[in-house]
Amino acid sequence: MLINYDDQVTWLEYRFSCDVEARNQTIEKKFIEYFDHLDTIHLLDAGSGTGSNFRHYFEKLPDRQEWTFLEQDADTLEACRIKLREYADHHSFDFSDENGLITIASPQKSATIQLKQGILDNIKELVDMEHLDVVTANALFDLVSYEQFDEFAARLACYQVCLMATLNYYETSFLPFMEEDARYHRYFHTHMMRPQEFGAAMGPNCSEEMLDLLTAHEMQCEQEASQWHLKRYDTTMQHYILHYFEHAIRDLNLSKKEIVEMEEWISRKKELSHQHELEIIVDHSDIFAYPW
């Protein structure tokens, strides 16, 4: 089967099981127990993608859930609508989608979901934060600038809203190790933190900077490691990682010689993957932050 490695929805679905396995159970337990006294929980899922956080947490959180999904890309929002229906059908849950409100109900749980297009900067205009209990976000904040997160953390503190942020990127490692790997890690991280319209993304520094800012805004934080370990037969996910490395590095202002050397490096990694001799480890952290 041919895979379009540039299709966002396909990528999000392929990575779903890796995300589930990587999520830190200690942090997740603290998050769930923090809210187990509630009858109804109000959540904003920032950078909601195809609804992976909802699908992961629905059967673990209080019986009545009111979700708002915030996603920048309109096509991804529409794909999310389809994935939620598929999720409900797969589990034989009741599903309705009427007047802009999705409802999913199991014998024990019920949830309403509103889909909204926007970015983190729009949160105050799109969501009533006074009635919000927690913001969830998965693999989002490496794409956010320090200044954007500072403003976001200030709003969380102001409205006494918790944050459950999973898979905050730290670094990537390849096994077997090659001496030139460090060079391409550096290029990849340079691309992540390149200047953009909103500023420079936090990239691999996101966990450290998030913790500093949350603490500065008087939020209490719990952090633990979360990790993708793509083993020798996880070739599809390995090729996704190599695809993102290659295209990020091509965006940099490198010489023709450097591009040729990068292509040779990528080719060696792909050959190892085809031979089932490659492993890739992507280190992240999970953070649960809550008011003092």
Image (cartoon, rainbow, N blue to C red):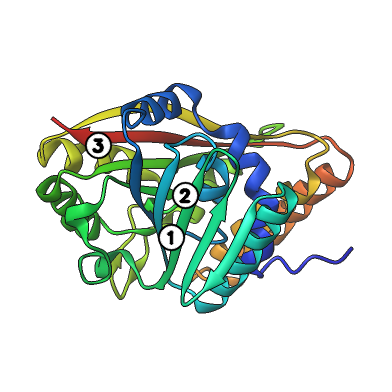
Instruction: Give the mark nearer the N terminus: 2 vs 1.
Output: 1
From the image, tell me which residue sits under label 1.
47
CB under 8 Å between callouts 3 and 2? no
Three-letter amino acid code at the position of disc 3 = Leu
- Mark 3 secondary-structure assignment: helix
From the image, tell me which residue sits under label 2.
139
For the point 38% across and 47% down, the residue is 136
Q: Looking at this view, name the residue that lies furthest to the front.
A: 107
Q: CA distance from mark 3 to mark 2?
A: 15 Å
Instruction: Give the mark nearer the N terminus: 3 vs 2.
Output: 2
- Mark 1 secondary-structure assignment: loop
State the residue in front, 233 or 66. 66
For the point 19% across and 40% down, the residue is 214
Please tell me whether residue 251 is drawn above or below residue 141 in the rendered image. below
* Residue 41 appears anywhere in the view: yes
CB under 8 Å between callouts 2 and 1? yes
Instruction: Please state the horizontal and vertical placement of residue 248, each as a whole percent of the image.
Output: 55, 64
Instruction: Please state the horizontal and vertical placement of residue 201, each as a whole percent of the image.
Output: 34, 59
- Residue 210, image quadrant: top left
Q: Quadrant of the image for the C terminus? A: top left
Three-letter amino acid code at the position of disc 2 = Ala
* Residue 228 marker: none
Three-letter amino acid code at the position of disc 1 = Gly
Binning the other alpha carbons within 10 Å of mark 1 as few (below 14), some (14 to 19) or many (20 upward) gives many
Binning the other alpha carbons within 10 Å of mark 3 as few (below 14), some (14 to 19) or many (20 upward) gives many
From the image, tell me which residue sits under label 3.
211
- Residue 272, image quadrant: top right
State the residue in front, 28 or 65. 65
> Total marks drawn?
3
- Is 134 on the left or on the right of 285, as rendered? left
CB under 8 Å between callouts 3 and 1? no
Instruction: Give the mark nearer the N terminus: 3 vs 1.
Output: 1
